[in-house]
């Protein structure tokens, strides 16, 4: 229309918009998170955010009431110009400001906006409130998704502990259940705070404790299912350590006999301790036995590493003498091939090497130096001095 009058279609559009706004606001209040937020006792971040969101939601309903009032007035008026003013002009009062306080009374400035401006304002608030509700629901669901499996795992752990006569683990499971329940109650009153670092750290700690408890009970059950075989294997491992110590001691004694110089002492003998641990395995609850078995296995592994190192050090000295002997024989064979067996210098050096390597105890350091001198002399042309040794292959 070009005469400043609103067409009936404009009014129909506003009525349709009114219905859509009403439906959107009702859906907003029907959001699952709205129930969480309207429950008593909100705390923390959620309480602060909802204090703003709640005010925005109330303002939305107030603005909707203004919208309805204007549309209702436009619907009943018979004046097309008045209808046009209501539907398109600044017909909605949104505030008053005192601009002068005169003797005749206060002079006020009235702020007015159009239906379109009101709708834009409502859109902004609606989006912010809806985003808050979604965030609350997402964090609430995420917390439940993580804590429910933990609660189920703890319930299973309690039943498991009862079947294994594991009183300490049953108490631990109940303690963890209490901690988890307290954390969930806190998250229900502050869903947004459940994602803050402190809350996440607490939940991570509980989850780690639950995992350790479950692993402990699972290992105890596994141990109970194959206890005779496990006990036999543990006995075998302790015996193996004792046998390894015997071999290491023999290798050291032989090294002391054969080689000149200090030979490392054997590590502390843990045989009595290991036998004591082994004898204690068949006592207590299954979780106690599982812990004792794990500790025994760790002690066996440590003793095995120490004795293996000691055995290798002792046999290494003996092997070194054998290796030097082998190299000397190779050099001697080369001397024969070169026809230099009778050279006085080589004969003298060969006698020195032979005496060092075939004498007990053998001075490995001196033998190594003598053999190097023999190699250098062999690698030199007859009757010629050389400075750079050449290793044989």
Image (tube, rainbow, N blue to C red):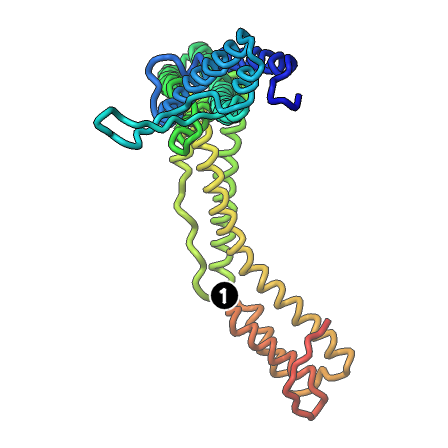
Residue 131 visible at all: no
Image position of 200 (left or right of 75) = left
- Residue at the image position 61 percent from the left and 63 percent from the top: 322
Residue 370 visible at all: yes
Q: Return the residue nearer the eye: 203 or 173.
A: 203
Q: Return the residue nearer the eye: 173 or 81.
A: 81
Quickly name the residue at label 1. Answer: 361
Q: Quadrant of the N terminus?
A: top right
Q: Return the residue nearer the eye: 301 or 119.
A: 119
- Residue at the image position 53 percent from the left and 31 percent from the top: 236
Above-or-below relation of 329 to 317: below
Count up the numbered dots.
1
Image position of 344 (left or right of 240) = right
- Residue at the image position 30 percent from the left and 29 percent from the top: 98
x%, y% of residue 90?
49, 24
Above-or-below relation of 255 to 203: below
- Residue that sits furthest to the top in the current view: 76
x%, y% of residue 342?
70, 85
Q: Quadrant of the C terminus?
A: bottom right
Label 1 crowd bin: few (<14), some (14–19), many (20+), radius 10 Å: some
x%, y% of residue 83?
55, 15
- Badge 1 element: loop
x%, y% of residue 195?
44, 29
- Residue that sits furthest to the left in the current view: 103
């Amino acid at each position: 229309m070009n005469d400043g009058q609103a067409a009936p279609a404009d009014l129909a559009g506003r009525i349709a918009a009114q219905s859509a706004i009403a439906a959107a606001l009702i859906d907003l209040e029907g959001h699952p998170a709205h129930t969480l937020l309207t429950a008593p006792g909100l705390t923390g971040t959620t309480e602060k955010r909802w204090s703003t969101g709640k005010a925005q939601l109330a303002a939305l309903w107030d603005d909707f009431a203004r919208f309805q009032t204007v549309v209702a007035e436009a619907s009943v008026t018979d004046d097309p110009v008045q209808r046009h003013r209501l539907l398109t002009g600044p017909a909605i009062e949104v505030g008053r400001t005192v601009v002068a306080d005169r003797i005749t009374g206060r002079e006020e400035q009235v702020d007015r906006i159009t239906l379109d401006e009101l709708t834009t304002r409502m859109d902004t608030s609606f989006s912010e409130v809806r985003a808050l509700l979604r965030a609350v629901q997402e964090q609430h669901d995420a917390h439940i998704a993580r804590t429910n499996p933990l609660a189920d795992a703890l319930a299973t752990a309690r039943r498991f502990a009862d079947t294994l006569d594991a009183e300490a683990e049953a108490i631990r499971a109940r303690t963890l259940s209490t901690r988890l329940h307290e954390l969930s109650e806190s998250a229900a009153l502050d869903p947004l705070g459940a994602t803050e670092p402190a809350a996440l750290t607490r939940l991570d700690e509980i989850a780690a404790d639950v995992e350790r408890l479950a692993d402990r009970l699972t290992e105890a059950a596994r141990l109970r299912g194959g206890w005779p075989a496990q006990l036999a294997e543990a006995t075998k491992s302790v015996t193996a350590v004792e046998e390894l110590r015997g071999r290491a001691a023999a290798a050291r004694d032989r090294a002391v006999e054969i080689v000149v110089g200090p030979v490392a002492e054997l590590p502390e003998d843990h045989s009595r301790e290991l036998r004591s641990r082994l004898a204690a395995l068949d006592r207590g609850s299954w979780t106690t036995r599982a812990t004792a078995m794990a500790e025994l296995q760790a002690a066996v592994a440590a003793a095995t590493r120490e004795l293996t190192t000691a055995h290798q050090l002792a046999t290494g000295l003996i092997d070194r003498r054998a290796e030097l002997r082998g190299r000397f024989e190779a050099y001697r064979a080369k001397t024969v091939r070169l026809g230099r067996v009778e050279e006085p210098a080589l004969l003298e050096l060969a006698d020195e090497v032979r005496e060092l390597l075939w004498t007990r105890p053998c001075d490995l350091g001196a033998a190594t130096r003598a053999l190097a001198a023999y190699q250098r002399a062999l690698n030199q042309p007859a009757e010629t001095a050389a400075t750079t040794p050449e290793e044989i292959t």
